[in-house]
């Protein structure tokens, strides 16, 4: 009988119930909230559902020595997590983004690239705030990139500068990407007048096929020469776009923008979520990162909208830009552009801003990659 009780006691010691702490329960609860928001609210479900389930996976407690945890060398989760730690996944996602992105709005209105550039001030604003709060320069740079609203770029840069903070940075970046409508709309309404929200912009000109083919080649050469350290992201982004626009690599473009990006997004979401183990994730530093991520996102939105208002001081009547597209300078494609559209339609049901907002939106993708390259050059 004693042997049976000993065996049962040993079995119990290996169960998750025996090793559970309140921190594990808290992270599992957060994971469930992420799943609910993704399914019920439909806030970035392709991101929140994998991340939420990954949080649950990563916070099922187990006894040491089973070699199943994401931080245990050689485990399955650890092998999949190397795509995050080594920065393999983000360039593959950028390849898919490039293959599904139409740069016509930016090509037809080149001035909109300045809005995308202005929104990146949020990155450097958060960088300075992180330094002020006591983070090391490399950590501050990795935290600041959250302001670009670009999850893959945040993962790529944190894997190079501050891998120990990657879980908190990635979850923060993706969380605020999902909350784009909630965060940006009040800021847009605060900074614009009724008259400004009613500004109608001229329809963008039609972009030729030749221009669409030349753009990714020329765009890559120029941006890569400026910031060679951003080459992995910029190269894959523009290469993916060339596959799409060339017209002769349709199968490759469809694979990159479909099955490949779906698989990589699933893996990156699941492993990032699983990396938020309670003993690693729950800390004062994580809370600071979440606060700084929110501030960087707010600063980026402020700067984008205010910069459009500044540009309008030099634009003659009939060529002014609706400030509501300023929020789209962050690289949350196409969600921030959709926010521009929805807020614009509330002011004028016949004023469609989506095609205009896509200009600064895709410029923001390029801008966040360039900003990451700059930070990596100085801090790497």
Image (cartoon, grey):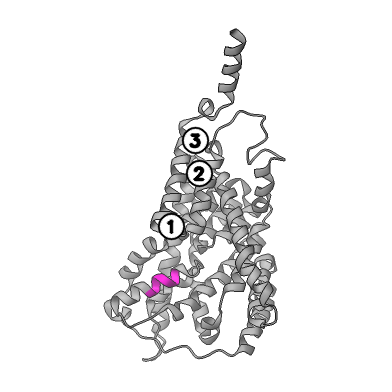
- Write down the quadrant of residue 375 in the picture: bottom right
Q: Which mark is residue 181?
A: none
Residue at the right extreme, as displayed: 74
Can you see residue 140? yes
The quadrant of the rendering that contains the N terminus is top right
For the residues labelled 2 and 1, the Cα–Cα distance comes to 15 Å
**Looking at the image, which is closer to me, 146 or 46?**
46
Is residue 190 inside the magenta stretch? no
Q: Secondary structure at mark 2?
A: helix
Magenta span: predominant SS is helix
Label 2: few (<14), some (14–19) or many (≥20) C-alpha neighbours in 10 Å: some
In the rendered structure, which segment of residues is drawn in magenta? 336-341
Label 3: few (<14), some (14–19) or many (≥20) C-alpha neighbours in 10 Å: many
- Write down the quadrant of residue 180 in the picture: bottom left
Picture residue at 46% right of the left edge, 53% below the top = 292
- Which residue matches tag 3? 24
Picture residue at 56% right of the left edge, 79% below the top = 103
- Which residue matches tag 1? 295
- Which residue matches tag 2? 285
| Residue 246 pos. (x, y %) | 67, 82
| Residue 201 pos. (x, y %) | 39, 86
Front disc: 1 or 3: 3
Picture residue at 27% right of the left edge, 77% below the top = 194
Q: Secondary structure at mark 3?
A: helix
């Amino acid at each position: 009988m004693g042997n049976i009780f000993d065996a049962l006691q040993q079995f119990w010691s290996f169960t998750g119930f025996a090793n559970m702490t309140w921190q594990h329960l808290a992270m599992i609860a957060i994971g469930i909230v992420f799943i609910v928001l993704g399914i019920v609210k439909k806030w970035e479900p392709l991101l929140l559902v994998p991340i939420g389930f990954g949080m649950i996976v990563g916070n099922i407690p187990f006894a040491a020595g089973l070699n199943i945890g994401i931080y245990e060398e050689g485990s399955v989760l650890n092998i999949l997590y190397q795509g995050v730690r080594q920065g393999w996944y983000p360039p593959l996602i950028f390849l898919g983004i490039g293959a599904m992105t139409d740069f016509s709005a930016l090509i037809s209105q080149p001035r909109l690239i300045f809005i995308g550039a202005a929104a990146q001030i949020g990155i450097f604003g958060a960088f300075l705030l992180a330094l002020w709060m006591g983070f090391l320069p490399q950590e501050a740079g990795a935290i600041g990139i959250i302001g670009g609203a670009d999850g893959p770029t945040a993962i790529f840069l944190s894997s190079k500068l501050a891998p120990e903070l990657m879980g908190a940075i990635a979850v923060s970046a993706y969380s605020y990407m999902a909350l784009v409508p909630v965060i940006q709309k009040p800021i847009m309404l605060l900074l614009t007048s009724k008259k400004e929200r009613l500004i109608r912009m001229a329809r963008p000109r039609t972009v030729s096929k030749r221009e669409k083919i030349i753009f990714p080649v020329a765009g890559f050469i120029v941006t890569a020469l400026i910031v060679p350290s951003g080459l992995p992201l910029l190269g894959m982004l523009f290469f993916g776009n060339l596959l799409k626009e060339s017209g002769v690599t349709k199968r490759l473009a469809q694979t990159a923008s479909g099955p490949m990006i779906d698989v990589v997004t699933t893996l990156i979401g699941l492993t990032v979520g699983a990396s938020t183990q309670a003993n690693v994730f729950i800390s004062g530093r994580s809370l600071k990162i979440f606060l700084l991520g929110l501030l960087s996102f707010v600063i980026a939105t402020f700067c984008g909208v205010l910069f459009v208002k500044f540009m309008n001081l030099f634009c003659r009547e009939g060529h002014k830009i609706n400030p509501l597209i300023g929020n789209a300078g962050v690289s949350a494609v196409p969600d921030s552009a959709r926010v521009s559209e929805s807020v614009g339609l509330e002011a004028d049901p016949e004023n469609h801003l989506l095609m205009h907002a896509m200009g600064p939106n895709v410029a923001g993708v390029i801008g966040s990659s360039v900003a990451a390259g700059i930070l990596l050059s100085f801090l790497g």
